Image (cartoon, helix red, strand yellow):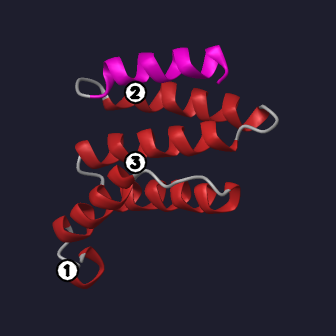
């Protein structure tokens, strides 16, 4: 993986619990960099998963669901294995929203 993308992800992880805005900024930077690279679909999947986790942990459940959906779509398109955490947190996000049909 691209070192710059990985560095941005690490910085975002550092801010994940304390500063949503800072973490989101660095994840957006990582996503833009990953999108600019050729054959970067696995990197984009990883970043979308991290964006989903960030939104979930800050109780932005609809945005988390959207990010995990994008992660799954990229995984499907590239033929890679989908991150199981994304499925689990998607289910929990739907439950938090009271949409129990989608949650389970």
**Numbered label tally:** 3
- Asked if residue 63 is positioned above or below residue 45 in the image, the reply reads below
Residue of label 3:
52
Q: Position of residue 94 (x, y in %)?
A: 26, 69
Q: Secondary structure at mark 3?
A: helix
Between disc 2 and disc 1, the foreground one is 1
Q: Main secondary structure of the magenta part?
A: helix
Would you say 65 lies left or right of 73 here? Answer: left
Observer-nearest of 19 and 89 = 89
Sequence order check, earlier mark of 2 and 3: 2
Distance of label 2 from label 3 (alpha carbons):
12 Å
Q: Residues within 10 Å of mark 2 (few under 14, many from 20)?
A: many
Residue found at x 78% / y 31%: 37
Residue found at x 32% / y 32%: 20
In the figure, residue 10 lies in which quadrant? top left
Asked if residue 10 lies in the magenta stretch, the reply is yes
Would you say 10 lies left or right of 18 here? Answer: right
Q: Residues within 10 Å of mark 3 (few under 14, many from 20)?
A: many
In the figure, residue 3 lies in which quadrant? top right
Asked if residue 9 lies in the magenta stretch, the reply is yes
Numbered tag placed on residue 23 in the rendering = 2
Q: Disc 2 vs disc 3: Cβ atoms closer than 8 Å?
A: no
Distance of label 3 from label 1 (alpha carbons):
19 Å
Q: Residues within 10 Å of mark 1 (few under 14, many from 20)?
A: few
Q: Secondary structure at mark 2?
A: helix
Distance of label 2 from label 1 (alpha carbons):
29 Å
- The magenta span reads 1-16
Quadrant of the drawing holding the N terminus: top right
Residue of label 1:
100
Between disc 2 and disc 3, the foreground one is 3
């Amino acid at each position: 993986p691209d070192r710059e993308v990985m560095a941005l992800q690490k910085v975002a992880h550092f801010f994940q619990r304390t500063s949503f805005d800072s973490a989101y900024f660095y994840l957006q930077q990582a996503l833009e960099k990953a999108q600019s690279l050729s054959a970067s679909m696995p990197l984009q999947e990883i970043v979308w998963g991290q964006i989903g986790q960030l939104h979930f942990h800050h109780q932005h459940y609809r945005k988390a669901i959207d990010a995990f959906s994008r992660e799954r779509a990229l995984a499907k398109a590239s033929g890679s294995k989908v991150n199981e955490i994304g499925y689990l947190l998607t289910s929990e996000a739907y439950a938090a929203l009271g949409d129990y049909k989608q949650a389970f």
